[in-house]
Image: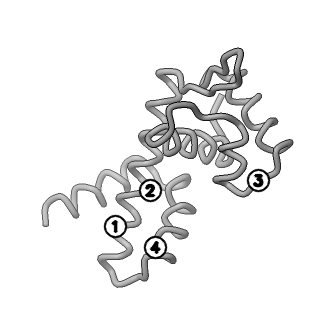
Amino acid sequence: MALKHSGEMYLETIYVLSKTKSSVRSIDVAEYMNYSKPSVSRGIGILKKEQYITVDHDGSISLTDTGLLLAQKIYERHTVLSKILMMLGVDEKTAIEDACKIEHDISDKSFKALKKHIEDR
């Protein structure tokens, strides 16, 4: 089943948090995203059901191999798109916000072309 925008946002958040925290829990995700605990609980339940994450007995969330690959892809899109927008003169705050919107909808083909363009500079 294709993951929706919100699911991708949760995966990206779990990935980002896991880079600095030894254990990621739903409360961490809720605080980072400024979402309610019930909303995060629903989102985590969907990701678990779709096998993008596992949640152990103490509530610690881990990305599965599939979840990790998707989270890394989304995070890469976010960072590359932010960089491109800032190179074009967009302020950092706006670039980050807009990249977050674009990262979920841009095709693989267009993203690869943009990425290649900045790598060739």
Q: Mark 3 points at which residue?
A: 35
User: Amino acid type of disc 1?
Assistant: Lys
Q: Which of marks 4 and 3 is nearer the N terminus?
A: 3
Q: Earlier in the sequence, mark 3 or mark 1?
A: 3
Q: Are marks 3 and 1 in contact (CB under 8 Å)?
A: no
User: Could you tell me which quadrant the C terminus lies in?
Assistant: bottom left
Q: Label 4 to label 3, Cα distance in Å?
A: 22 Å
Camera-side residue of 73 and 21: 21
Measured as percent of width and height from the top left, residue 9 is found at 61, 48
Q: Label 4 to label 2, Cα distance in Å?
A: 10 Å
Camera-side residue of 120 and 109: 120
Q: Label 2 to label 3, Cα distance in Å?
A: 20 Å
Q: Do the residues labelled 1 and 4 touch (CB within 8 Å)?
A: no
| Residue drawn at 48 percent across, 35 percent down | 70
Q: Mark 4 points at which residue?
A: 95
| Label 4 CA crowd tier, 10 Å (few <14, some 14–19, many 20+) | many
| Residue 83 circle label | 1
| Residue drawn at 54 percent across, 54 percent down | 105
Measured as percent of width and height from the top left, residue 15 is found at 50, 39
User: Could you tell me which quadrant the N terminus lies in?
Assistant: top right
| Residue drawn at 61 percent across, 25 percent down | 53
Q: Label 3 to label 1, Cα distance in Å?
A: 26 Å
User: Amino acid type of disc 3?
Assistant: Tyr
| Label 2 CA crowd tier, 10 Å (few <14, some 14–19, many 20+) | many
In terms of secondary structure, where does tag 3 sit?
A: loop
Tell me which corner region of the image, top left, top right, bottom left or bottom right, holds residue 85: bottom left
52 lies above or below 74: above
Q: Name the residue under label 2.
A: 78
In terms of secondary structure, where does tag 2 sit?
A: helix
User: Amino acid type of disc 4?
Assistant: Ala
